Amino acid sequence: MDFEIGPGLFGDGFMWTILWSDALIFLLVGAISLFVASFRRNPQNMERWRQVFATRLGMATFVIIMSYVVIALVDSVHFRKALPATEEQSSEQVFYSNDVHSLLDLALGEMGERPERTYSAPFALKSWNKENLLLPDGERVRDYPELAYGGAHLASPESFVKDVAIKSLVGIGKGLAVALALIGLHAFWLRRSLSAGAGEISPLPWKSAWITFAIIMAVLGWLITLGNLYHVLGTDQAGNDTLFESLKGIRTGVLIGTLATLITMPVAISLGLAAGYFRGWIDDVVQYIYTTLISIPGLLLIAASVLLFQVWINNNPQFFEIGLEKADAKFLALCFILGITSWTTLCRLLRAETLKISQLDYVQAAHAFGVSHFQIIKRHILPNLSHIIMISFVLDFSGLVLAEAVLAYIGVGIDPAMASWGNMINMASTELSREPSIWWNLCGAFFLMFTLVLSVNLFSDLVRDAFDPKTKLETA
Amino acid sequence: MFSYIIRRLCYAIPILIGVNLLTFVLFFIVNTPEDMATAHLGDKYVTEEAVQEWIAEKGYDQPLFFNGDADGLGTLTDTIFFNKSLKLFAFDFGTSDAGRSIQSDVLDRMGPSLALALPTFFIGIFVNISVALMVLMFRGSSLDRFAVVVFVTLMSISYLFYIIFGQYYMAKMSRLFPVSGFNDGIDGWRFLILPIVIGVISGIGASARWYRSLFIEVAGLDFARTARAKGVSEAGVLFRHILPNTMLPILTGVVVVIPVLFMGSLVMESFFSIPGLGSYLLDAIRAQDFAIVRAMVFLGSVLYIIGLILTDISYTWADPRVRLS
């Protein structure tokens, strides 16, 4: 899906390009906001959420997760730049580059557009490989060549340490300044709304949220400033900046965690509800479907489906205009397939819970009053299932992010045209054994992935404790 | 009991038919044999004859369900559905796209898979339950909270990272173990230690945390408190009262997996070059050998269903109140 926008607004012409996954993710953001809005109306749910955010850990992990989500969303706004007009071309005709950029690329500055020839270590000034060099006096030597971009602004290598120190301070300062400004605004707003009334509610631990936010902004400021001057995490085999690739992997990681569950959630909810509510032959059919799917080992089903879908995509290239669209289609297929394998657990839980709820007196009473099936499900059953849906969504997320790495290793992961942590970790398995070993590729992907998964795991624990009535026993 | 097992086996048949149909649709209707041939033979510039020859050679040149050209029973048996899908029920896996007998390959490779998977599995259960019981002793203390944080941290690390890191540091840096490889018989233990250790460690986070929450739930119940009140030692409470009462959920999670252990571990086996079923399947996926993948999907579901039946049987052993009927 392409939308052309002529020159004028942003200088040169460019074209918004909406990949299918972009459209889906923004649709989902809308759906989740609606869900949250409807959730807020229920005071019981509000109380439970308050319980999650009343802990410092809940606040801090939520801020971290939201930063990932925001970066993923910014990275989901794609466009293609117009190519400079050539002489034979008529003035109305504009051609667009096949490289798709995102707003994140703009925010990161030049970070992604400084290719070196091959590997280089973090903050290195010289390449990792020796090459034949031609000295100015005509002599040929074999030595490490200087990098084309990493530290190219330095007058001499001696000023390296001083430069890094100064630029670090500048970067951290910039990040902190932005963070403090936003925190100040928020604190001001908070005070006003507090003084306006509602004094009885105990205050949430905003301080830990602010500290986390400030740290994230400082790190981002530092990374962006230094990342435009050096290769903070080195470069990979093709000479791409590892930090840039890792940051681009955020979108893939967040999307795979959310899309895979959400794509199939409508199916899981409607089938689970139908089976538990109507029982009889519908129950039998639904049970049959999910028992069949469960009995195929998950990884095998995923591998087989992805393999077959890849064959289909490769045999039908006519549907995809640019390379990224093809990668995007593969990505969506992967999400869908992952969703199908994790769908069954949710469906089973929902069926059992619906069976239980539909026996309760108030549902029976509603039946007696002649309320329609649809109304009963909507008013009496679905609201009582929402916590199960939410808990399973949050719990599945981290598992899916981790699964992506394993799938990449098996060879049924994300297309290499899309940056992904799985592909980076997979590459690193051979790079570590080189001499001297290349550890930075593993490092960037691993650290970002670990932070995301850890935050989500900690957060989901809190959510489960707050919403699951069973865990109340733990305090006993 | 016996009639129960028979009945469960009969229930398994429609499920296996479902799996069979699903794989059939995936492999022969979503993708036609022509697609597979082009994928297999390489590029788009492959000639039509080569494609047809490949299809004929692999036996994919028959009609899907109904063969009008054949006589008698042949109308049904000379079809792809019969030859490639129904024959799986007789464990007749046919030949792989590379021309080898899948059946003998599977039998050859089950041994190494089990040599790795069984010790990993049982040592893993032992370690996880011990760790969880140890943490349970200190429940409510700061040590308990610290342990939970460690568990969550451990389970947030990618499985691949455990393997890469373990292989790199334990094998390459300290040279304690061979990097990879396999040897039949007793000498093979040196090759297996490292993958087993890594497999166990990578599982601790998620499993020990799960066992801990199971134990804690039971530890708060009345009978545990009564036992303590009448002076049973803490160890006695743990082993005599808490552990037996968590047996059912533990068995539910554990027994299902045992038959599937035959399938081996895809990632672990290929990292350590162990010639088991996992690496067999992985090679098949990478070489796009659909015949093998199809056979393994079927085999996997058969094993899973056996696991379900075993789980039910194990209930009667763990809890005398359970009667199968």
Image: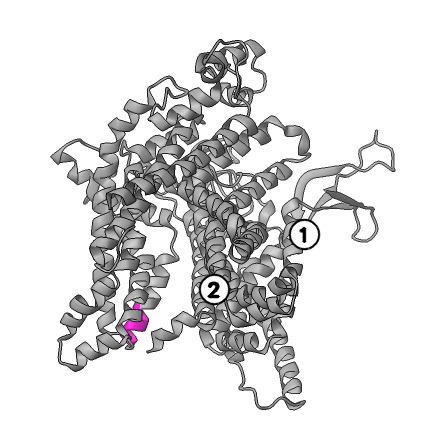
What colour-coding does the image apply?
A: one colour
Q: Residues within 10 Å of mark 2 (few under 14, many from 20)?
A: few
Front-most of B214 and B97?
B214
Q: In this view of the protein, can residue A91 be seen by the observer?
A: yes
Front-most of A20 and A283?
A283
Residue B202 position, x and y percent, is 31, 52
Q: Is residue B18 left or right of residue B111?
A: right
Earlier along the polypeptide chain: callout 2 or callout 1?
Answer: 1
Q: Is residue A52 left or right of residue A36?
A: left
Height in image: B315 above or below A48? above
Q: Amino acid at mark 2?
A: Lys
Residue B206 position, x and y percent, is 34, 58
Residue B12 position, x and y percent, is 37, 39
Q: Tell me the magenta residue range.
A: B142-147
Q: Residues within 10 Å of mark 1 (few under 14, many from 20)?
A: some
The chain identifier of the residue carrying mark 2 reads A
The chain identifier of the residue carrying mark 1 reads A
Q: Amino acid at mark 1?
A: Val
Which circle, 2 or 1, is nearer the viewer?
A: 2
**Residue pictured at 30% horizontal, 65% vertical:** B214
**Residue pictured at 51% horizontal, 47% vertical:** A286
Helix, strand, or loop for circle 1?
loop
Q: Is residue B32 left or right of residue B283?
A: right
Name the residue beneath numbered marker 2: A356
Question: What's the magenta bit mostly, secondary-structure-wise?
Answer: helix
Name the residue beneath numbered marker 1: A77
**Residue pictured at 20% horizontal, 51% vertical:** B123
Helix, strand, or loop for circle 2?
helix
Height in image: A20 above or below B251? above
